[in-house]
Amino acid sequence: MPSLALAGRFIAAHARTRYSRQHMSRLQDRMLRRLLNHAWDHSPYYRERFAAAGISRADLATIELHRLPTIDKQELMQHFDTLVTDPALKLDDLRAFDADESDPASTYLGRYHVVHSSGSTGKPGYFVYDDCAWNRMLAAITRGALWNRSLPWVVRFLFRRPRVAFIAATDGRYGGVMAVGDGVSDLGLEQISLDINMPLEQWIVHINVFKPTVIIGYPSAIKILMRMVDEGHIHISPERIISCGEPMDPGLRAQITNTFGCAVINFYGASESLALGVESDPTDGMVLFDDMNLIEVDDGQMYLTSLTNYTQPLIRYRISDRLQLIDSERAAARFDGVSLADPSLTNRQYPFTRSHVLLSRNEDMLWFDDGRGGREFLHPLAIEGFCVEGLLDYQFAKTGDKAFTMVAERRAQADENNIRTQVDEQMRQILHSKRLDHIAFDIIFVDHIMPDPRTGKKRLVVTCHCDASTMGKAV
C-alpha cells in the first residue's frame, strides 16, 4: 500500500505544476531567502564567504543571486566539515561509513541519506540529505516519473500495481538507485534491480520472469534491453520507460518508442540534486524543477542552488553539465533578480523554466567477445568507482575485441606498483562478475589526462588504436 506521507507530498508537488509563473517566482524567492539565512546561521563556511564578499546577514533579504560567491566540488569537499550545518557531520566519518556499510538504504546517524557521487569529473564526493530534503526529492522524482499525467490517471495507474525494473549501477550509494528503491518501496510496488555488471543471460532470465510494466534505467542499458527484445530473447510490454543517469539521444528515444510503443520520460538529476528536471516532449525542451532548485547559466556554465537541502547547502554550485535556456537572449535577465522571470523561458503548460541539455555525459559502452560466441559489455559507470590511494584520474581505452587499457594519472609521490596491484585486483573482480576473465587488461601511466574539448569533461571511455605515447589525450 502506498505511503500516505509520500502520497501527500506527491499531491503537493503535482499541485505546484499548476502554479502561475509569478507564484512560482515568489516561491523560489521565499525558499532562497530561507536557505541563505539558514546557511548564515549554521554554516561557518558560508558565513565567512559571505562576509568576505561584503555581504551582511541583513543583505540576504534582498541580495541578487548573481552577487553571491560561487563554489565548486573541489572547494565543497575541501571545506565539507565547516560547510555542513550539523557539526556531527564529518567527511572522514562519512567515508568510513560508506566503506563499512554495504546497505545503500542505511542512513548515517539514523537520519542522513548519504549519496556517493560517481566521480566522472574528478574525485568522488559525498552529498548528504536529511529526511525532510530526501522525502521532498522522492516526491519530485515520483512526479517526474509520472510526468504529464493527471491525478486521476496516476491513481488508476498505481491501482493496477505496476512492476518496476531498475537497470543501473546498483552496488553503491548512487543517488538513482537509492531514490528509486525508496520511492518504489514507499509506493508499495514490486521492484527488481538489475546491476549493469550482471551478465546479459541473467538479465534475460530475471526480466522474463518479473515482466516489468515500468522500466527505469540508463539509456545505454535500455538500448541493450531493446536489442534483446528485437532478437526475441525478452518478451515484455512496458507501459512507461524512464531514462535517467545519462543524456537521452533523440534517435534512441524514437527507437525505444517504436519498439515498446509506450511513453518515454527523460529524467534529469545529479548527486547534488536528485530532481533537476524532466523531458517528455523533446520539441518542448527539458522542464527544470524551479520548485526544487534555482539554475543559472552564464556563458554556458551551469550553477545550481538547491532550495531544499539545508544540511549541506549548495549555493551557486558549479556543475560541469552544459545547459542552454530556451530563448537564451532573454534568459540573461532572469538572474538580475531572483523573482524576475521572462514568460518565454517557461513551459507553455507548466510554470517551469525550459532548457536544452547540450553536452552532458555520453559515454561509449565497452563491448567484448564473451568467449561463448556472443557479446558482453562493461558499462562506464560500473568501472568509475575505483578508490585507490595515489590514483588521481583514469580513462579506459578499448584496444580490441578482447583487450582494453586503463590510462592512469597518479600523484607525484605515489607508488606506481601499489596502484597497479590494487587496480588490477578491482578490475579482475569486475571482469569476473561479467564472465569476461579472458579479456586482456593493462595499465599505462601518463602525466595528464586531457578533457574532451567539446564538453570540458573527461571522457571515461575512448576507442584507441594507438600507442602509449598518444594515450591520455581526448579522442
Image (cartoon, helix red, strand yellow):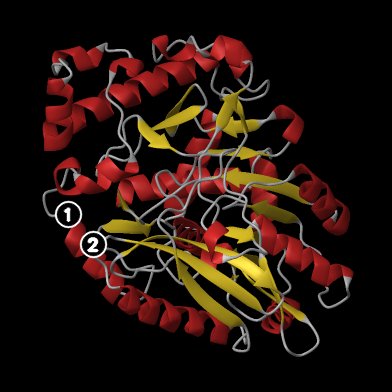
Q: Are marks 1 and 2 in contact (CB under 8 Å)?
A: yes
Q: Amino acid at mark 1?
A: Leu
Quadrant in the picture for residue 389: bottom left
Determine whether the residue tagged by mark 1 lies in a helix, strand or loop: loop
**Residue at left 68%, top 80%?**
402
Q: Is residue 160 visible?
A: no
The x and y percentages for residue 163 are 66, 67
Residue 319 lies, with reference to residue 116, above or below; the image says above
Residue 172 lies, with reference to residue 322, above or below; the image says below
The x and y percentages for residue 205 are 72, 83
The x and y percentages for residue 36 are 24, 26
Residue 408 lies, with reference to residue 245, above or below; the image says below
The x and y percentages for residue 265 are 68, 46
Of residues 183 and 230, the one drawn nearer to the viewer in this rendering = 230
Label 2: how many residues lie within 10 Å, few (<14), some (14-19) or many (20+)?
some
**Residue under label 1:** 89
Q: Is residue 178 left or right of residue 149?
A: left
**Residue under label 2:** 94
Q: Amino acid at mark 2?
A: Leu
Determine whether the residue tagged by mark 2 lies in a helix, strand or loop: helix
Image mark for residue 387: none
**Residue at left 69%, top 78%?**
203
Of residues 473 and 157, the one drawn nearer to the viewer in this rendering = 473
Quadrant in the picture for residue 159: bottom right
Q: Is residue 212 visible?
A: yes
